[in-house]
Structure formats: structure tokens, C-alpha cells
Image (tube, grey):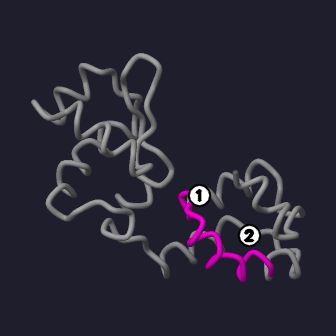
Amino acid sequence: MVRHWLKDQGLSALDDRETRTSILGVSGGVPERLSVLRGLLQQIVADRTKGRYERLSEWLAASPLMAESAGLHLDLLDRFRDFAVLADSDDLTHEDVQMVLGDSGEILGSFFAALGLAEPLPDGGLRLSPLGRIITR
């Protein structure tokens, strides 16, 4: 998606693996955040600067994404953070998800995936998505 967005915005000069990964890491792929980020990306292209990752990281620090903006109610933030701590280091199996999230693990896991905060795995497990990583910062 980021690759297509860069092309549509005339920012193909930023279409390399490292820069796309950095853009996804600070935007979570959220169209609204990509739109806000567009001005900085145009500056990076115009300046032909190297430090792209650093500039994007500075932007993320100045423009944090709040859990509520991603649709995560504050009542679930602690449960999501518990999940994120384990999922950030490794993909979680279905059993891991149940252990971390308790009896409602399947429902919460599906909810996190529906919000784009987690990515479902073929075996029923979950991994933390780029958007989920932003929320936990």
C-alpha cells in the first residue's frame, strides 16, 4: 500500500525498502497519517537528504498516535499493551494469545486485528502490526 501511495503522490524517489519500512513504521499505513506526513516527505525528496529515518522518527515523536484515534478504547489499552509486549518480540500462537488475553483472548485478538493493531497468522496466532507498534510507544 505504501508503495502505491508514494507513486500516487509523486514521491517515487522514496520507494526503496528502507524508506518504505520507515514510513510504515511512523504512519502505521493509516491514510490520514500518510496525508499529514506528505509535506515532510516532499521536503526529504527536495533536500535529497540522507537521514530519512531520523527525520521520520522525529516526526513520529512530534505526532504521536493515540490509542483512541486508532479505535482502541482506553479500557482495553492495558490488555493491548500486555499483548504487544509479547507479540513485539515474537509471533504469538493461538495458545499464546489465549494465555496473554485470557478467556476473551479470541474475541480481543480478533478485535485488535480488525482495528489493524495486530495481524492474524495462518495458524490462528497473531503478530503486532506496524500500527500496533506505534500505539505502544
Q: Is residue 77 above or below residue 116?
A: below
Q: In the rendered structure, does residue 100 fall within the stretch colored magenta?
A: no
Q: Does 61 sit left or right of 56 as displayed?
A: left
In primary-sequence order, the first of circles 1 and 2 is 1
Q: Which residue is mark 2?
A: 51
Residue at 79% x, 76% y: name it.
44
Rendered location of residue 32, percent (x, y): 57, 72
* Quadrant of residue 55 within the rendered picture: bottom right
Mark 1 to mark 2: distance in Å?
21 Å
User: What span is colored magenta in the figure?
Assistant: 26-42
Tell me residue 134's x, y (percent): 44, 60
- Spot occupied by residue 114 in the image (x, y as percentages of width and height): 39, 45
- Kindly identify the residue that appears in the image at 41 percent across and 52 percent down: 132
Mark nearest the camera among 1 and 2 is 1
Q: Quadrant of residue 10?
A: bottom right
The amino acid on which the numbered mark 1 sits, given as a three-letter code, is: Gly
Query: Is 41 part of what is drawn in magenta?
Result: yes
Q: Secondary structure at mark 2?
A: loop
In the image, farthest residue toward the top: 123
135 or 5: which is nearer to us? 5
Question: Dot 1: what SS?
Answer: loop
Q: Amino acid at mark 2?
A: Gly
Furthest residue in direction left, as rendered: 103
Please, is residue 58 above or below residue 79 in the view? below
- Quadrant where the C terminus lies? bottom left
Q: Which residue is mark 1?
A: 29
Q: Is residue 31 toward the left or the right of residue 135 in the image? A: right
